[in-house]
Amino acid sequence: MEAPVIIDLPSTTTSALNKKLVEIREQGGQVALGRVLTLVIVADDDSKLEEAIEAANGASREHPSRVIVVAKGARTAAPRIDGQIRVGGDAGASEVIVLRLYGPLAAQGQSAVVPLLLPDAPIVCWWPGAGPKDPDKDPLGELAQRRITDSAAEKNPVKALTTRAKAYTEGDTDLAWTRLTHWRAQLVSALDLPPYEKITGATVTGEADSPSTELLAAWLAEYLKVPVKRVKSSGAAGIISVTLDRRSGPVELHRPDGRVGTLTQPGQPTRRIALQRRSTQDCLIEELRRLDPDEVYEAALQGLGKITSGTNGKTGAPAKADVTSPATAAGSAASGAHK
């Protein structure tokens, strides 16, 4: 792939960066004005930074954007901003502005970002690594209509998820939730097939520190209104299996290898389903498709307190829940799912 044009501006100012952007536009037309949003990436200036920029570049092919990267450098260094502009080539349909902030400026990301925002364009803030406990109260998060975190990137993923659930504000989301889209779609599709029986309980098994497993169990608890057991396993990464109990026999979706799932249920042929883990780029593309609050995610967060822990994949005889149609209940949950 063609390399982007990279312009370095060491020890610069935001005014100088803006001036250079205008100059590039006038001289070569390299920077288009048709951006649909501003994506602000907030991360430490480390080896993982380029991975986040690459994902944003890929997402920009569907969502042309101005990408502003706030890379926090050494806090003990002298205060300065090292700027960089990337356009064309593998920068995708975006213009990328990298701000490396050093010293006290590392905590002043908002002041550096505001002069570079596109007028009248929505703002999305993304923390690809460790993020704030309350994204809406973060100085950069306050600027954004949407705030994307990733609990799986935290030192304690499940604790980070539950902390943010308590501080949830409309516009918050988590890539741990976005990774569930295909799982939710498959489960809803399975319940649209006969026999149309009530779901009486569910078991979700996955890695002990998998926030996606927690969210999947919470989503089922919230929308099916049945007892849901969350089983922790060290045998595989991420989500391993989901079992939905019915009188005629369970619906089981099992993915032991992180790539291919097997769906079994009474009266239906066994199906193999592609359920490979989604890339960060795919998840980011999906999240940038919507700028309105994700009500289904909000409801799933409320279900976190309704799940119970277990030690194996077997459930007892849970009390029957008042669910008139499992397919309808799960379908309403999926109505807000990302397409």
Image (cartoon, helix red, strand yellow):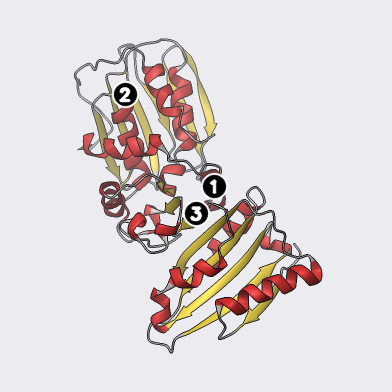
293 lies left or right of 63: left
Report the Cα–Cα distance between label 1 and label 2: 28 Å
**In the current view of this chain or complex, which residue is farthest to the front?**
120
Report the Cα–Cα distance between label 2 and label 3: 32 Å
Disc 1 designates what residue? 288
Q: In this view, does 300 lie above or below 5?
A: above
Mark in front: 1 vs 2: 1
State the residue in front, 67 or 284: 67
Amino acid found under the numbered disc labelled 3: Val
State the residue in front, 98 or 158: 98
Report the Cα–Cα distance between label 1 and label 3: 8 Å
At x 48%, y 28%, the residue is 186
State the residue in front, 96 or 208: 96
Mark in front: 2 vs 3: 3
Q: Position of residue 37 (x, y in %)?
A: 58, 53
Disc 2 designates what residue? 224
Disc 3 designates what residue? 124
Q: Which of marks 1 and 2 is nearer the N terminus?
A: 2
Q: Where is residue 171 in the image (x, y as percent from the top left)?
A: 41, 46
At x 34%, y 40%, the residue is 215
- The picture quadrant where one finds residue 219 is top left
Disc marking residue 243: none
Q: Is residue 134 above or below residue 292?
A: below
Residues under numbered marks 1 and 3 in contact, where contact means CB atoms less than 8 Å apart: yes
Q: Is residue 178 above or below residue 57?
A: above
Amino acid found under the numbered disc labelled 1: Leu
- The picture quadrant where one finds residue 9 is bottom right
295 lies left or right of 262: left
Amino acid found under the numbered disc labelled 2: Leu
